Image (tube, rainbow, N blue to C red):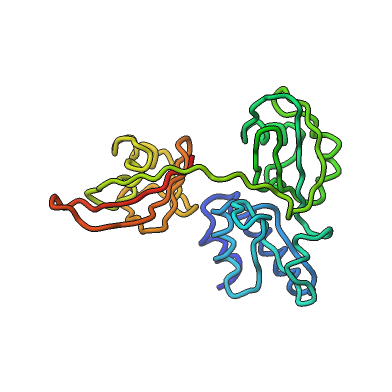
């Protein structure tokens, strides 16, 4: 199948088409020339699309820590190994910002300050916020600009420095485990249980295109959810169906769901 046909099949929007064409060109050009090649940071949905587009070719994703959600797509020729991605020449760099006051900055505050500095979202990877400091992954070329221009977040003055990717401090992810019984493993039913909302409200979120199943948009409330599937609902957060147990006397199915806080 021709590249254009594959992109047309995968893309759901014009933005998808532009992004996938850019991913394909960068990775395939690097492969043909035998040089390193990489994209901007991709969301998990975009990574899934890129994986389908590049199926059968050599590539990988990298975003710093193993738990990273936003990652670049890259190609490394045979003369380079994985240490290239964490070294000084890596296309990805890590910055740490610290502040002296007691302001409880949030992920939204940090992202807002980055966007306010005039950079594009695609140049920013995952952001790890802790009391008094945050670490952020960015594309290497914008590091000098951020070191000079990222001076504040919220009302706090920032001191920003570059750190090694290995020095990134990943905060412990807070979660809550939910045990419930469901009449069905439909998507709307799992969303209802995982976020403690009514089935009707869950259906409203799906109809409004606010739900993603395994990083792909999904409006089908009757879509069956499998153990290990992750569901993200804009405005509510993220859940994962961990276990599906036995059936109760009333015909309901026992489930264990993790909600990420």
Give 144 or 104, whichever is nearer the viewer.
Answer: 104
Residue at horizontal 41%, vertical 47%? Answer: 258
Give 206 or 130, whichever is nearer the viewer.
Answer: 130
- Whether residue 123 sits left or right of residue 217 in the image: it is right
- Whether residue 220 sits left or right of residue 95 in the image: it is left
Q: Quadrant of the N terminus?
A: bottom right
8 up-or-down from 33: above or below: above
124 up-or-down from 34: above or below: above
Residue at horizontal 22%, vertical 49%? Answer: 183
Please, which residue is most extreme toward the top here? 155
Residue at horizontal 83%, vertical 34%? Answer: 149
Quarter of the rendering containing residue 25: bottom right
Residue at horizontal 71%, vertical 32%? Answer: 113
- Whether residue 246 sits left or right of residue 101 in the image: it is left
Quarter of the rendering containing residue 116: top right
Q: Residue 242, position in %: x, y?
A: 39, 55
Quarter of the rendering containing residue 64: bottom right
Please, which residue is most extreme toward the left here? 249
28 up-or-down from 133: above or below: below
Q: Residue 255, position in %: x, y?
A: 30, 52
Q: How many numbered circles does the render carry?
A: 0
Q: Residue 29, position in %: x, y?
A: 75, 69
Q: Residue 9, position in %: x, y?
A: 51, 62
């Amino acid at each position: 199948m021709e590249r254009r046909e594959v992109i047309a099949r995968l893309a759901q929007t014009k933005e998808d088409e532009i992004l996938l064409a850019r991913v394909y060109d960068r990775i395939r050009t690097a492969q043909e020339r035998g040089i390193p090649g990489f994209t901007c940071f991709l969301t998990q949905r975009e990574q899934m699309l890129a994986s389908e587009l590049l199926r059968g070719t050599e590539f990988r994703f990298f975003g710093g820590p193993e738990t990273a959600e936003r990652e670049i797509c890259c190609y490394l020729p045979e003369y380079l190994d994985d240490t290239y991605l964490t070294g000084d020449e890596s296309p990805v760099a890590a910055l740490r910002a610290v502040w002296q006051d007691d302001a409880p900055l949030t992920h939204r505050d940090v992202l807002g300050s980055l966007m306010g500095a005039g950079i594009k979202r695609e140049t920013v990877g995952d952001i790890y916020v802790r009391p008094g400091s945050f670490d952020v992954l960015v594309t290497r070329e914008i590091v000098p600009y951020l070191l000079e221009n990222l001076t504040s977040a919220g009302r706090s003055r920032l001191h920003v420095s570059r750190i090694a990717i290995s020095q990134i401090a990943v905060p412990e992810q807070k979660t809550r485990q939910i045990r419930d019984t469901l009449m069905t493993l439909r998507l709307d039913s799992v969303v209802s249980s995982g976020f403690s909302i009514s089935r009707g409200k869950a259906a409203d979120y799906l109809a409004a295109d606010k739900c993603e199943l395994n990083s792909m948009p999904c409006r089908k409330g009757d879509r069956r959810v499998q153990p290990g599937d992750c569901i993200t609902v804009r405005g509510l957060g993220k859940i994962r169906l961990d276990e599906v147990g036995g059936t109760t006397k009333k015909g309901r199915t026992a489930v264990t769901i993790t909600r990420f806080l």
